[in-house]
Image: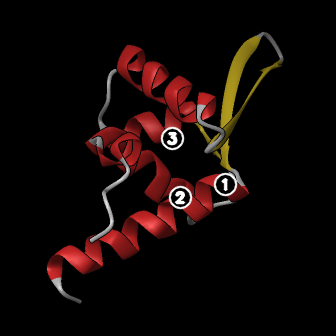
């Protein structure tokens, strides 16, 4: 059996990746609202996913307000699909 990707096995990181699999990009506030995560915890988890090359994080200002958006990378999409396939092996789908 394939090992589960430890980076994606975290509940919050998996939730973020699941969200990003279905959209072109998503902003921090949206992800925070959907996941119910605290801003600090979400920020740490986004940094981990970004450092692994699974997501791209873009920071900009809209007027005077900061805006952070995230998008999944090709590597992240591949890692997510491999994770799902590994889960299917575990649950015999």
Give the labeled residue for mark 3.
Answer: 30
Q: Residue at x 40, y 14 (%)?
A: 40
Give the number of marks.
Answer: 3
Q: How far apart are marks 3 and 1 (CA)?
A: 23 Å
Circle nearer the viewer, 3 or 1: 1
Q: How far apart are marks 3 and 2 (CA)?
A: 23 Å
Looking at the image, do the residues carrying marks 2 and 1 touch, with CB atoms under 8 Å apart?
Answer: yes
Q: Residue at x 45, y 58 (%)?
A: 18
Which quadrant is the N terminus positioned in?
A: bottom left
Name the N-terminal-most of marks 3 and 2. Answer: 3
Which quadrant is the C terminus positioned in?
A: bottom left
Q: Quadrant of residue 91?
A: bottom left
**Badge 2: how crowded within 10 Å, few (<14), some, or many (20+)?**
some
Circle nearer the viewer, 3 or 2: 2
Is 83 placed left or right of 57 in the picture? left
Outermost residue on the bottom side: it is 93
**Residue 22 place in picture, x, y as percent:** 57, 66
**Residue 82 place in picture, x, y as percent:** 47, 68
Give the labeled residue for mark 1.
Answer: 75
Element on which disc 3 rests = helix
Nearer the observer, 24 or 89: 89
Image: 38 above or below 85? above
Image: 92 above or below 19? below
Q: Residue 85 carries which label?
A: none
Q: Which residue is drawn at 33% across and 39% down?
A: 12
Q: Residue at x 60, y 64 (%)?
A: 78
Is 33 placed left or right of 53 in the picture? left
């Amino acid at each position: 059996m394939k090992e589960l990707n430890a980076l994606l096995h975290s509940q919050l990181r998996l939730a973020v990746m699941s969200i990003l699999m279905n959209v072109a990009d998503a902003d921090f506030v949206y992800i925070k609202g959907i996941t119910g995560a605290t801003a600090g915890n979400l920020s740490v988890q986004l940094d981990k996913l970004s450092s692994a090359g699974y997501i791209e994080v873009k920071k900009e200002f809209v007027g005077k307000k900061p805006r952070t958006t995230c998008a999944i990378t090709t590597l992240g999409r591949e890692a997510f699909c491999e994770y799902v396939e590994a889960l299917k092996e575990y649950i015999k789908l």
